[in-house]
Image: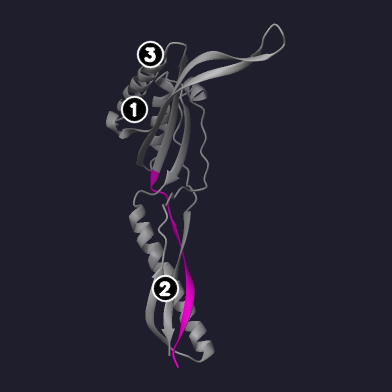
Amino acid sequence: MSGKITVKGEGKITAAPDTISLSAKLSSTDKDYAVAVGNSANQLEKLKNGIKKFGFDKKTLKTSNFAVNADYESVNDENGRYKRVFKGFTCVHDLVLEFDFDSKKLADVISAVAESLSEPDISIDFTVKDTDKLRDELLKNAVANARKKAELLCAAAGVTLGTLVSIDYTSVDLFPDCATSYAVDAKCARLAAPKAVNILPEDIEINDSVTIVWETV
C-alpha cells in the first residue's frame, strides 16, 4: 500500500564577500524649494567629480531614493500653545556606489567623498555580486537536504521512497550582506586622507527552504 511523505528541506551556504557597496545620503534644506533642490544637485555633481578622479565613471553612482519634503517644527506661541512652524523644504538624495572588493579603492572612495565637500552621511556594506549563482546553489542544497531526510525517514519506517509528487517553494529576495561593520565619518576623513586597511570581512551565510512531497512504496 502506497503512502506519502512530506519533508521540508533546508539549504545553507556561505560565501566570501566580493563586492563593496557604499551608500551616501545627501541632504539639503532651504525655505525655497528650488534652492533646496539646486543645492542637492550641486552636492551630487561635486561627489561625481570626486569619484571620477579615482577612475570611476559618473554613471556608476546610482540613485536609490530621491525625495523632497516640507519640514515643520513645533514651537510655543506667546500663550504657551504649540503651533507648527514651517522650517523649509528638505531634499534627500540617497546614492549607491558598488565596486569590486579592494581595500585601496575603498580608501580612495572615502577620500573622494570627504574632498567633495558634499558632506554626505555614508555607510559601507560588503556583499556578493552574483546572487543568481548563490540562489542556484542554495536551492540545490535545500532539495538535497529534503531528499536525504526523506530517505532516512523511509528507511526507518521500512518503506521505499517513490515518485516525487510536488515541490512547494516561495521565492524570496536575497540581500546577501555580511555582518562585518565598517564605519567612517566623512567629516573626520576630511582632516586626514584615509589609509587602506587590510580587512577580511566575515563570510556571508544565507538560508532558504523548500517543501517536497514523495510517494512511498
Residue 204 at least partly seen: yes
From which residue to which does the magenta span run?
A: 1-19
Residue at 41 percent of width and 73 percent of height: 144
State the image coordinates of residue 202 (x, y, percent, origin top left).
Answer: 50, 50
Query: In the image, which is nearer the foreground, mark 3 or mark 2?
Result: 3
How dense is the environment of label 3, judged by Cα within 10 Å: few (below 14), some, or many (20 and up)? few
Q: Earlier in the sequence, mark 3 or mark 2?
A: 3
Quarter in which the N terminus is drawn: bottom left
Q: CA distance from mark 3 to mark 2?
A: 58 Å
* Type of the residue with mark 2: Ala
The amino acid marked with disc number 1 is Ile
User: What colour-coding does the image apply?
Assistant: one colour
Sequence-first disc among 3 and 1? 3
Q: Is residue 83 above or below residue 64?
A: above
Give the residue pinned by disc 1.
51
Q: Which residue in the structure is indicated by mark 2?
A: 144
Q: Is residue 190 above or below residue 61?
A: above
Mark 2 or mark 1: which comes first in sequence? Answer: 1
Left or right of residue 111, residue 132 in this image: left
Q: Which type of secondary structure does the marked residue at label 3 adopt?
A: helix
